[in-house]
Every structure is written in structure tokens, then in C-alpha cells.
Image (cartoon, rainbow, N blue to C red):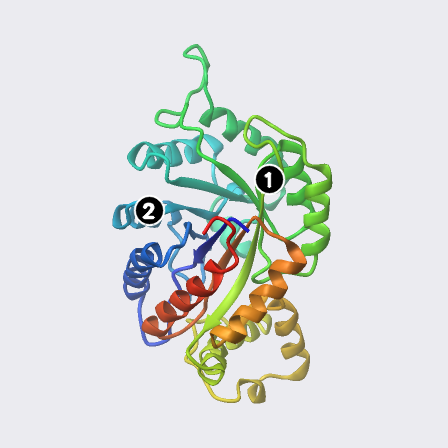
Amino acid sequence: MEHFSLLDLSPIPEGFEAADAIANTIDLAAKAEAFGYHRFWLAEHHNLAGIASTATVVLICRVAAATKSMRVGSGGIMLPNHAPLVVAEQFGTLATMFPGRIDLGLGRAPGGDANTVRALRRYMDQADTFPQDVVELLTYLGDTSENAPVRAIPGEGTHVPVWILGSSLFGAQLAAHLGLPYAFASHFAPQVLGEALDIYRERFQPSAWLDKPRVMVAASACAADTDEEADFLRSSQILSFARRLTGQRGKMPKPVKNVEAGISPHVMERVNEDLAVSAWGSPTSLREGFSAIIKKHEPDELIVTSWIHDHDARVRSFEITAEVLKGFCANR
């Protein structure tokens, strides 16, 4: 493994507002850079009371301004919601402001429910144009001719690295066909992770952007000084997933003791399936969890996310996680 990175959804905890979540994100980014994280990615989601990363491009700009060398980008931008030219202009502008530090991860989902899609003035069947939209976007970010009928300015010639994100086999096939790096959303949907990575690696075609497969695997992490403390902190994530599965929306829950007692067995079984690619506990337990994930999937890079209510505890979790993951990186 070469690098470890951080995915932040700018979660809004119960008892706090979006302004607090955004301030927490900026604080976390500066500290993550000091901890040694290679990238800091933010994700586009809409109409969710517990997530403040909706205007992803704006937050990327703010995080890049608050850091010095760490790469900053999207994990991801939901391309069906946007015209490829607009995305190229936005990320071209970011790359012009912060040279050599901007990444563009692209997702095929709309990042919201049907009502949200309508409010975005988009339609679900437009997801079928995702491959063509990716190719169009790559063209705008490449070395276009001055005579081209449409140019992204800023954007052209920036060659912003583009990643394909996915939680199904479709993204793996597309990333392999286009010769792009591939990131799998196994932090919440790991069911076909192994099969997707096999398809990507076996079918990968070298391209102008990449000469060999590059895999990023996402994992949930919750670290503390003791296993008991980590179990308590992690209950916020378990509750969040359980509530999502039962149609409940809200901010990130406060942690509780004996969280499974308040969740039906069949829902808890699904939560455990969705969080199968996770590591939690004390540094020793965390190391064991990550070792199993890395040994099984052999990622080039691991990107971790954390769903902890208390900001200081969340920062501490990422600090412990960084110290553990440094031991798995060949270039450190």
C-alpha cells in the first residue's frame, strides 16, 4: 500500500448546526495534513439533515486554502447532477488556484432520492449517459485545441486526475475500459467489493492517464485509546445506518451504551453487512482490522471515514488511525 487518505462528509451532529460541521471539517483537514493523510476528499450528498458537504466544490476550495500540501478533492461529484463543462470549469479553477493538489472523483448516482433529483432538475435516466459524460469531461481537462468549439477556461490543460467511484460492477468496468483509477465505496456498500476489484484489475486497459490499475478501497474507522471507548463512540455510526435503513432521517446521533439493544436483529444484521469493511478499537485492535482488509483486497491506497459525534474524539480517532496506517505503507 502506498498511501492512506481521509473521506469526510462534514457530518452534522445532534445538538449542532451545519456551520459547526463545516468548521469541524476545516479544523479536521488542517490536522489531517499534520497527521500524514495523503488526500482529503469530500462527498456530494443532498437533502440529508446530517451531512453538510452538499456544495462540495465550495468546501474543497475552503479545505485547500486551509492546508498546504495535502491533495484535496471529491469522493465524489455526482456527475448526473452536473454538465461536464461546468465540472471541468470548476475543477479547472480549483487546479489553477491550487496547482498539483486537486482530485476529481466521479460518481454515477444522483446523491439523493427521487424528490431530490427532481429538485435538482435532473432525471434518473440520465445516468445512462455517464460514460459519455466522463469522456467529455476528460476532453475538457486535456490539451484542447484553440479551435475547439467548446473549451473549459480555466480547465483545459490542467489534467486534473479523474477517479471513477462506485459501489457496483458498472464503475469497475468503466474505469478499466477508460484506464482510470478506481475507488470503491466499501465503507457503506461492500457487498461486491472483491468481484469489482477483480474485474477492474483483469480488464484494465493502459491509457494516457494511467499505465496500470490503481485501486482505492474505502473503510470505516473508529479508534480510541481503549476498545471500550471505541465501541461507545462507534454506536453513533451504527445508529445512523440503522435509522437510514428504517427510513428515519436526522443528524448524527449521540453515542449510546449497548446500541444493539435498541435495534431489531434483522436491521442489525444489515448494518453489520454494510459496515463489513471497518476497523475499530484500540490501536492494537485497529491494526488487526486494517491488516485483514489490506491483506484481502491489496489496495494501492486506503481511504478512511469516521462517524463520531464528538469532534475532539473524531480528530483523535483519525490521529490514531494515521499512526496505525503508516505501518502499512511501503513508502514510509
- Whole-angstrom CA distance, mark 1 to mark 2, is 25 Å
Q: Residue at x 68, y 79 (%)?
A: 266
- Give the answer, above or below, for where 112 lies relative to 84: below
Residue 100, position as x, y percentages in the image: 37, 35
Which residue appears farthest toward the top when viewing the image? 147
Q: Tag 2: residue type?
A: Val
Horizontally, residue 318 falls left or right of residue 273, namely left
Q: Which residue is mark 1?
A: 126
Apparent side of residue 230 relative to residue 164 in the rendered image (left or right): left
Q: Position of residue 155 (x, y in %)?
A: 39, 28
Q: What residue sits right under mark 2 in the picture?
A: 58
The x and y percentages for residue 42 are 42, 52
Name the residue located 51 percent from the left edge and 29 percent from the top edge: 138
> Mark 1 near mark 2, Cβ–Cβ under 8 Å?
no
SS for callout 2: helix
Q: Secondary structure at mark 1?
A: helix
x, y (%) of residue 57?
37, 45
Camera-side residue of 106 and 329: 329
Give the answer, above or below, for where 253 lies relative to 36: below
Instruction: Please tell me how crowded label 2 is: few (under 14), some (14-19), or many (20+) other residues with Cα within 10 Å.
Output: few
Q: Is residue 96 left or right of residue 46?
A: left
Classed neighbour count for the residue bearing mark 1: other residues with Cα under 10 Å, few (<14), some (14–19), many (≥20): some
- Please report the residue visible at 38 percent of the width from the left and 61 percent of the height from the top: 10
Give the foreground label among 1 and 2. Answer: 2
Give me the residue at 48% from left, 88% from top.
257
Instruction: Using the image, tell me which numbered label, if any, was put on residue 223.
Output: none
